[in-house]
């Protein structure tokens, strides 16, 4: 009887601790959204639409110049399939790093840890990115482009891989910026290079093999080709899925270890 009571008490304590943690995480997410988006629906709408504007500006430029898509019959679909996973990855990896800089004073409260800031921002960015994806799909359908992939499972896994890579690289960025605050600007410049070399605006596989071989080491390029493989199976794209997954897991593990054993001691 006593053992049963003790077990119930322990289970109750665990549930209470979990509920407390979820309340903290919920509060961090709400604060994150309100402070970043001005506390209004319009402010949040701007952040959701910003990457969408990026994609459709790219589409508009190439459409006005009458540049055909390298594969397929739709230029909007070609650019969107490359830009969506790359932008999801870049936005998450950048915003996770910025969250720990902006919200660092919150860690002075005993209930809030650095990991909580990372998780809260990652969840917010995942929701924001998903809403942006819905907008992109809706606008593609509105202009007469069928957004349905040939292989839906491959498209979903490409999107999830972009999220996981963004979180992993974002955690590493948190560790790096703990040592070098200037990395916030450095990563922004590095992101530009990764974006240009990711193949959003062209087909890297059409380049000479010697150039394409080295470009494949860019995980953002692998993400773009992963998504395009779901839409253009006849293009014969060879994606190294394990390479992207290992990048994500390695970055996440390394970043968490650095944050726990190095950055926390410095602060």
Image (cartoon, rainbow, N blue to C red):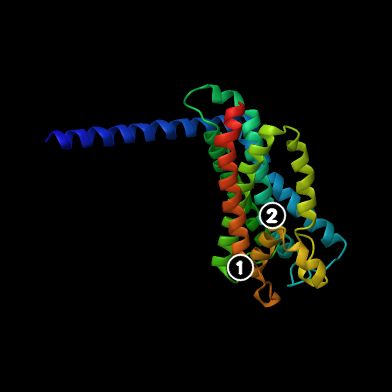
Q: Is 181 left or right of 168, judged from the image as shown?
A: right
> Is 237 drawn above or below residue 87 in the view shown?
below
Q: Secondary structure at mark 1?
A: loop
Q: CA distance from mark 1 to mark 2?
A: 17 Å
Residue 33 appears in the rendering: no
Task: Find residue 86 and name its label.
Answer: 2
Q: Which corner quadrant of the image does residue 123 belong to?
A: top right
Q: Which corner quadrant of the image does residue 234 belong to?
A: bottom right
Image coords of residue 245 (percent x, y): 58, 58
Q: Is 126 left or right of 15, judged from the image as shown?
A: right
Label 1 or label 2, whichever lies nearer to me, is: 2
Q: Residues within 10 Å of mark 2 (few under 14, many from 20)?
A: many
The single residue placed furthest to the left in the displayed view is: 1
Q: Are marks 1 and 2 in contact (CB under 8 Å)?
A: no
Residue in the image at 74% along x and 53% along y:
55
Task: Find residue 149 and name its label.
Answer: 1
Image coords of residue 37 (percent x, y): 64, 33
């Amino acid at each position: 009887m006593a053992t049963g009571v003790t077990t119930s008490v322990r289970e109750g304590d665990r549930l209470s601790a979990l509920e407390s943690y979820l309340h903290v995480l919920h509060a961090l997410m709400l604060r994150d959204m309100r402070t970043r988006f001005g506390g209004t629906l319009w402010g949040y709408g701007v952040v959701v639409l910003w990457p969408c504007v990026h994609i459709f500006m790219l589409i508009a430029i190439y459409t006005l110049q009458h540049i055909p898509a390298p594969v397929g019959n739709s230029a909007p679909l070609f650019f969107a399939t490359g830009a969506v996973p790359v932008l999801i990855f870049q936005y998450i990896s950048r915003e996770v790093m910025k969250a720990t800089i902006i919200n660092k004073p919150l860690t002075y409260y005993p209930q809030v840890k650095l990991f909580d800031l990372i998780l809260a921002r990652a969840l917010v960015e995942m929701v924001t990115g998903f809403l942006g994806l819905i907008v992109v799909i809706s606008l593609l359908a509105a202009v007469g482009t069928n957004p349905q992939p040939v292989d839906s499972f491959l498209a979903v896994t490409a999107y999830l891989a972009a999220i996981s890579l963004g979180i992993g690289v974002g955690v590493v960025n948190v560790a790096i910026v703990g040592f070098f605050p200037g990395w916030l600007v450095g990563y922004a410049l590095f992101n530009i290079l990764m974006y240009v070399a990711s193949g959003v605006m062209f087909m890297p596989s059409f380049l000479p093999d010697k150039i394409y071989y080295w470009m494949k080491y860019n995980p953002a390029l692998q993400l773009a080709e992963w998504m395009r493989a779901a839409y253009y199976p006849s293009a014969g794209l060879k994606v190294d899925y394990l390479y992207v997954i290992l990048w994500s897991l390695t970055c996440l593990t390394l970043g968490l270890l650095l944050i726990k054993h190095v950055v926390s001691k410095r602060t």
